[in-house]
């Protein structure tokens, strides 16, 4: 016989925690996070292209 696991407590706890965290954050925090993520991605991409260019020049 297969064991039966009730995951409703874990799901309820996880959902409640996530909703309480989202409720305490300001919309400005979301915007700031999105902007910083975009800036980080652009900088990372630019540095990668620059390092590839340098590596080709050194070869």
Image: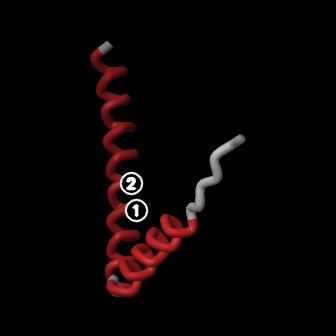
Q: Nearer the viewer, residue 38 or 4?
A: 4
Q: Is residue 28 above or below residue 9?
A: below
Q: Which residue is mark 2?
A: 42
Q: Nearer the viewer, residue 24 or 38?
A: 24
Quadrant assignment, res 17: bottom left
Q: Point out residue 42 in the picture as x, y percentages from the top left corner.
A: 38, 54
At 39% from the left and 53% from the top, the residue drawn is 41
At 63% from the left and 46% from the top, the residue drawn is 3
Quadrant assignment, res 45: top left
Q: Which residue is mark 1?
A: 38
At 33% from the left and 83% from the top, the residue drawn is 25
Q: Which secondary structure lies at badge 1? A: helix
Q: Which secondary structure lies at badge 2? A: helix
| Label 2, residues with CA under 10 Å away: few <14, some 14-19, many ≥20 | few
Q: Point out residue 33 in the picture as x, y percentages from the top left corner.
A: 35, 70
Q: Point out residue 31 in the picture as x, y percentages from the top left corner.
A: 38, 78
Quarter the C terminus occupies: top left
Quarter the N terminus occupies: top right
């Amino acid at each position: 016989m297969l064991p039966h696991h009730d995951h409703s407590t874990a799901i309820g706890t996880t959902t409640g925690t996530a909703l309480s965290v989202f409720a305490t954050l300001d919309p400005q925090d979301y915007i700031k996070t999105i902007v910083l993520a975009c800036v980080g991605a652009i900088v990372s991409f630019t540095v990668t292209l620059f390092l590839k260019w340098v590596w080709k020049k050194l070869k």
